[in-house]
Image (cartoon, rainbow, N blue to C red):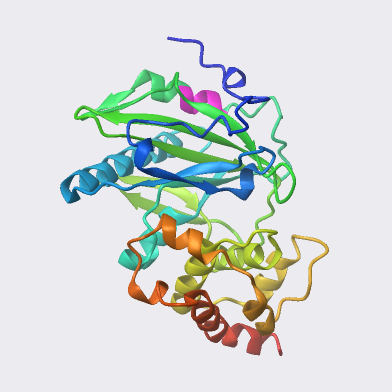
Amino acid sequence: MPNLDWRRLLGKSNPTGYPHTLLRTKQSASQAEFFDPALKQYGRAFRLGEPRLRDLAERTRWYAARQQVMEHLLGIVSTSSWQKSLVLRGSVLLKTWLGESAREPGDLDWVVLPSTLKMDDPRVDLYDMILKRVAKQPEWGDITMDATGARLDDIWTYEKAPGRRLVFPWQTADGLAGTVQLDFVFGEKIPSEPVPFTYQTQEGQALELLAASPAQSLAWKLLWLHTDMYPQGKDLYDAVLLAEAFPLDAELLEATLNTTPHQEPFTLASIEAWDIDWLSFLSEYPNLGEDAKTWKAEKAWQERLAQALRPTFDQAGQ
């Protein structure tokens, strides 16, 4: 087996200015670059968006292959010693809860437990574990993952809880190719208890994981929209869908907001004042519904969010 020590994959500098985890594949010519605030320590803090595949059958196969890769990685976590120390959050959960209206998941986001565990603690062997498991079984079906081509980057080095991003390239037998990223953040306090989550794979396998609840997921989205230097359109989109589908307790929202110091009070008026990068979001997700594509659509979505959160603010006496 090749030397897969994760420290060899973690880049300290890059003469191109790009993150080491921006891996180009055969489909990269049709993938636009998008600013990623998690990587802003780089001069060119970009990640690649979805490929623009004109052929519907090819596009369907590509998304199905990426989902298989993600499910393989979820399976690795679910059967590892880290299963009870990794809390899943993000687009995979939203797709399960919200169905067709949710964004197509393209990465795996994890919060590492306990929150006192440091990123450079020598006990953190999860990168080695995942790399070795992928190297041991690089092929299944017509898909091959390349553990030796994986790359690591530090993320959120200037704000939020710090972490690391692990990216794997993959390829199908008929030449489709892409990447899947796993983000792990450390020191993130979770104000509510993680919940058991069963993920059903395309092949019918049940994967048992820990996950953030819908309410906690919504509270995090609101925290990021309110406090991030670069609030993202995807977080507004997700927050609206979550707020319209699930109730949010005012105490949980307050506890989540209080995990970040030095912030402005969060009110209904705050929502309308957010400056959201909606155009980049639409460019990255061109297949969204028409209600996301109208002129100044972000303002309508901000109004929808404020309306959906009125019960939460009423509970808080605002």
Give the image quarter of residue 291: bottom left
Query: Does 19 sit left or right of 186 as displayed?
Result: left
Q: In which quarter of the image is the C terminus?
A: bottom right
Residue 278, percent from left and from top:
51, 66
Q: Nearer the viewer, residue 150 or 194?
A: 150
For the point 63% across and 26% down, the residue is 14
**Which residue shows up at 58% across the image and 64% down it?**
221
Reply above or below: 285 against 35: below
Q: Can residue 85 be seen in this view?
A: no
In the rendered view, tell whether residue 31 sits above or below residue 292.
above
Q: Which of 143 and 249 is in front in this view?
A: 143
188 shown above or below 259: above
The mark total stands at 0
Most common secondary structure along the magenta stretch? helix
Q: Quadrant of residue 124?
A: top right
Outermost residue toward the left in this view: 57
Quadrant where the N terminus is found in the figure: top left
Q: Which residue is drawn at 33% across and 36% down?
A: 27
Return the residue nearer the eye: 30 or 298.
30
Does the magenta-highlighted stretch encompass residue 159?
A: no
Q: Give the range drawn in magenta.
A: 126-131
* Residue located farthest toward the right when viewing the structure as drawn: 262
Residue 48 pos. (x, y %): 46, 42
Q: Quick check: can you spot residue 40?
A: yes
State the residue at coordinates (51%, 34%).
22
Can you say whether 144 is above or below 301 in the image?
above
Spot occupied by residue 2 in the image (x, y as percentages of width and height)? 46, 10
- Residue 128 forms part of the magenta stretch: yes
